[in-house]
């Protein structure tokens, strides 16, 4: 049958199992939006307040459901407004399809109205991107894009479609359940070999890794986001328990290993716990699983795990020996590798080592035990107590993000959504929208700082319009808290451009969008506000006044060894 390119886009999305897309229309993409209108009973479109919000919403949808997220935008500024969201997904390995529409092919390269080379702009922040110049190739490109986005190490893919291609007609052959022709499979396999350069892990390599683990006296598992992405939480837990190995986690792995598990030492790195940072520094084997040795974890590479043999398991060969030299590695799917490795691992006790680690776990910054009217720790722990394990938590970026990572007791995968690699202020609200759309039976809470929330509070319009029960908790200290903390510690208290002693009034802003607003200055006020917000089962914004100079501790100064943190000021 002959259909238009715009129809091909919609049919292929449905074919790939897409039920929701997030976006914002414009002139160049109107043909696709017209088809979305005609097919609204088959695929849902969520109109966000800004294209960046659409990208973050698709990202949050993907992280919380395990599906590929899809966002759309028109040409020029619409497309460039997606860039930060695409980069966020790229840094955190999130499967995302961004569909943009450009000016007609005859206008490309002529500085036409709202023309931009979006494939050139996004080349460094996508696994692959395409500009479709032939409508006959459109269907195969879309199908290939989905395969690329979710294969190997996941990531974003952009498809740019000139407007005349969306209007052109083509003979279209449906591909039920994602079935591929022999030619399409050949092309896709060739592309995947280029993108996912992994080799089969041999039995001999598994044996060597097992021997290393079995011989260790002070082993530590360094768990990264790759464990969560691979769905390898159960295998990780089985390995840790069988060999009695302490587990430290990165920010991206906070929901990959239960926070309250006796073997969990908490977050590692710049704002890592005393237990995690000391254990890594004194270990004799560091088993890095799905982790990339970010600078926020490693700090000083020459002194990181300086007494330890480092062994790395990761799906991306480019991460092996990139930041830290290893004594060995296994490259491939983490879940598959661990399932083969576990039978080779001997049961162990490591009593002396675990006792030492247990002692470190009792050490925490004095500031976190001080009594004050409303502490971030209380807020995080009360939300967790009230909602239990079935909630999804998103954050913006800053101090509040680190407090949530430190204090919220995550126990289930896909329950924590945050921008780790790029550190995108403005991520959380959009991500919470995508998470709520993708998980209608769960409560979604977005923790924000008053600085970050300024960047995306326009998405309250989206939350209200779609009657989403999202709760936004603002930790309001009247400043760009994390930047102020650095200014306090390293810049002599010169608070350049970080004081936010001006509006808006967050309660009034929420109410202007038709959302219930609360203001809290102490623990009892917060409990009443949060309890009421949860019982209402509607959207809410809770403005929490916290201390101006509240800090995130421990903190390892940039370039210092991670076992030399600042614990108090």
Image: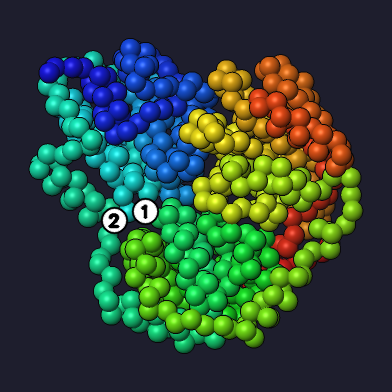
Vertical placement of residue 276 versus 472, above or below? below
Q: Residue at x 27, y 19 (%)?
A: 6
Q: Residue at x 62, y 30 (%)?
A: 470
The numbered mark at residue 153 is 1
Q: Residue at x 27, y 76 (%)?
A: 203
Vertical placement of residue 443 versus 405, above or below? above
Q: Residue at x 38, y 28 (%)?
A: 19
The numbered mark at residue 196 is 2
Question: Which image quarter holds the N terminus?
Answer: top left
| Image quadrant where residue 196 sits | bottom left
378 lies left or right of 283: right
Disc 2, SS: loop
Position of residue 33 measured from the top left corner of the image (x, y, whole percent): 36, 16
373 vs 86, nearest the viewer: 373
The answer to whether the residue labelled 2 contacts the one labelled 1, judged by CB atoms less than 8 Å apart, is yes
Determine crowd level at label 1: few under 14, some 14-19, many 20+ residues with C-alpha closer than 10 A.
many
| Image quadrant where residue 95 sits | top left
- Evaluate whether residue 115 shows in this view: no
423 vs 364, nearest the viewer: 364
218 vs 347, nearest the viewer: 347
Report the number of discs. Answer: 2
| Image quadrant where residue 230 sits | bottom left
395 lies left or right of 107: right
Question: Can you name the residue that lies furthest to the left here?
Answer: 182
Position of residue 234 measured from the top left corner of the image (x, y, whole percent): 46, 61
Position of residue 481 measured from the top left corner of the image (x, y, whole percent): 74, 46
């Amino acid at each position: 049958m002959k259909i238009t390119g715009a129809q091909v886009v919609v049919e292929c999305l449905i074919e790939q199992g897409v039920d929701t897309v997030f976006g914002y229309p414009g002139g160049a993409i109107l043909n696709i939006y017209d088809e979305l209108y005609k097919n609204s009973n088959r695929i849902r479109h969520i109109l966000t307040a800004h294209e960046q919000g659409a990208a973050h919403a698709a990202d949050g949808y993907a992280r919380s459901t395990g599906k590929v997220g899809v966002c759309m935008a028109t040409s020029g500024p619409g497309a460039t407004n997606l860039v930060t969201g695409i980069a966020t997904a790229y840094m955190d390995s999130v499967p995302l399809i961004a569909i943009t529409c450009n000016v007609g092919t005859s206008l490309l390269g002529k500085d036409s109205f709202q023309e931009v080379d979006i494939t050139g702009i996004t080349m460094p922040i996508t696994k692959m991107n395409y500009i479709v110049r032939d409508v006959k190739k459109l269907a195969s490109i879309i199908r290939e894009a989905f395969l690329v986005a979710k294969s190997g190490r996941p990531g974003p893919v952009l498809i740019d479609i000139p407007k005349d291609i969306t209007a052109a007609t083509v003979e279209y052959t449906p591909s039920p359940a994602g079935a591929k022709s022999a030619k399409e499979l050949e092309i896709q396999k060739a592309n995947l070999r280029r993108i996912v350069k992994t080799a089969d892990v041999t039995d001999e390599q598994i044996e060597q890794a097992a021997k290393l683990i079995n011989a260790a006296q002070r082993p530590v598992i360094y768990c990264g986001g790759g464990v969560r992405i691979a769905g390898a939480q159960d295998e990780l837990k089985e390995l840790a328990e069988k060999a009695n190995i302490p587990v430290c986690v990165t920010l991206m792995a906070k929901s990959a290993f239960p926070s309250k598990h006796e073997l969990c030492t908490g977050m590692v790195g710049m704002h890592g716990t005393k237990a995690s940072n000391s254990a890594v520094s004194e270990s004799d084997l560091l088993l890095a699983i799905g982790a990339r040795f970010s600078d926020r974890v490693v700090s000083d590479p020459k002194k990181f795990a300086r007494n330890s043999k480092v062994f790395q398991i990761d799906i991306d060969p480019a991460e092996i020996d990139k930041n830290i030299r290893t004594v060995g590695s296994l490259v491939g799917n983490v879940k598959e590798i661990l399932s083969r490795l576990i039978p080779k691992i001997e049961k162990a006790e490591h009593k002396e080592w675990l006792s030492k680690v247990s002692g470190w776990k009792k050490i925490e910054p004095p500031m976190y035990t001080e009594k004050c009217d409303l502490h971030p720790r209380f807020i995080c722990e009360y939300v967790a107590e009230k909602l239990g394990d079935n909630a999804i938590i998103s954050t913006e970026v800053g101090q509040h993000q680190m407090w949530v990572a430190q204090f919220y007791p995550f126990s289930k995968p896909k329950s924590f959504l945050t921008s780790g690699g790029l550190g995108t202020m403005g991520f959380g609200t959009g991500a919470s929208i995508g998470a709520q759309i993708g998980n209608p039976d769960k409560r979604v809470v977005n923790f924000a700082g008053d600085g970050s929330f300024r960047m995306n509070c326009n998405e309250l319009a989206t939350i209200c319009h779609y009657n989403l029960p999202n709760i936004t908790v603002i930790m309001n200290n009247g400043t760009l808290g994390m930047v102020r903390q650095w200014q306090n510690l390293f810049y002599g208290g010169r608070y350049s451009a970080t004081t936010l002693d001006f509006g808006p009034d967050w309660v009034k802003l929420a109410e202007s969008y038709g959302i219930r607003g609360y203001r809290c200055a102490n623990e009892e006020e917060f409990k009443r506000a949060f309890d009421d917000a949860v019982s209402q089962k509607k959207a809410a914004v809770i403005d929490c006044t916290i201390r101006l100079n509240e800090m995130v501790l421990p903190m390892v100064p940039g370039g210092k060894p991670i076992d030399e943190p600042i614990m108090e000021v």
